[in-house]
Amino acid sequence: MTSTDTTATTTATTTAAREHARAQAGEITDSMPVVPATDWPHPPADVPADRLTWAESIPGGRYTAVVLARGTRIRLTDRDGTACAPLMMWRADAPWERLNTADTVKVPWQAYLGTGHPLLSDQGRVLATIVADGSGHHDALCGASTLAGNTARYGAGSPESDSPAGRELLLLAGLKHGLAERDLPHPVSFFHGVRVAGDGTLVSTGNAGPGAAVDLVVHLPVVLAVAVADHPLDPSPDYHAGTVELLAWSAPEDLDALVADTFPGVDQDQEYRRALANSEAAHRAANPTSAAAPTGALAPTS
């Protein structure tokens, strides 16, 4: 009897199905969040396990969506070296405000994402800042793969297919939080790089390799959606998106350091300071009893 046959047999009745389901309690799989996150089996050396607030692996062709608090630090890791992770953010307390990729590259005068780069909303606020980057292979220019593109390339692109498109997966992630197709603009993508050639051609630079990671600090409460799907410019003829690990932990001290302009390795120009001040003002307006930003730490807003 095969294991499949065993499963079929042990779930043949309601009682057997209940016992089968209960027997899986506590099992850690590659496609579900670990609950509680503090039980994540291999926390990073620099993150105490008891600070983890979210932990999961996202296999290729899957997605996740989670609400994260202000002051959360996120670490995305390209476990296999073949991942591409389109990412979207919406303000959890005002979901009509969302990541704006055009401003994310325009305001800092930089199209290539890296340490210190803000992810800006359509209201000129910083939703998150990249505070560490061990990959250097990201993309804010191409957006996620599409149903039409993947159908033409792999023969299918729906979420149920063997080659789901990144945009289709992000749409499902948004739907879980009451968002619709109109709420899904152009995302940014981590772990698959793109550079602009001298003639304007967009050129894939691939991945950095297994274990490459990028960290972000969240400035305002957000709905975070991450899909894992092949990049639109991936040169491989086969769909081969690898697994991404997503860890999150409370790190208010990192946010305080960004506000105070003391975070190591993050150089803040005047455009960043203005967007940061706008984020702090929005937070204070919604939370008037919260602690004030350090005196004189923030540049005036425009």
Image: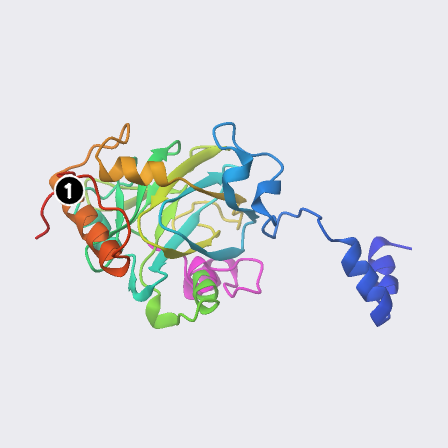
Residue lying farthest front?
Answer: 289
| Residue 215 coordinates in the image, percent (x, y) | 39, 38
Residue lying farthest right?
Answer: 1
Q: Residue at x 61, y 53 (%)?
A: 32
| Residue 282 coordinates in the image, percent (x, y) | 23, 57
Q: Would residue 41 appear left or right of 119 to someone viewing this image?
A: right
Res. 109 visible in picture: no
Residue bounds of the magenta highlight: 143-169
Res. 90 visible in picture: yes
Q: Would residue 254 appear left or right of 178 to someone viewing this image?
A: left
Considering the image in quadrants, where does the N terminus appear?
bottom right
Q: Residues within 10 Å of mark 1 (few under 14, many from 20)?
A: some
Observer-nearest of 28 and 147:
28
Q: Which residue is mark 1?
A: 298
- Protein image colouring: rainbow
Q: Would residue 263 appear left or right of 222 to someone viewing this image?
A: left
Q: Quadrant of the rendered structure where residue 118 is? A: top left
Magenta includes 132? no
Q: Residue at x 21, y 48 (%)?
A: 105
| Residue 262 coordinates in the image, percent (x, y) | 24, 30
| Residue 92 coordinates in the image, percent (x, y) | 37, 61
Magenta includes 144? yes
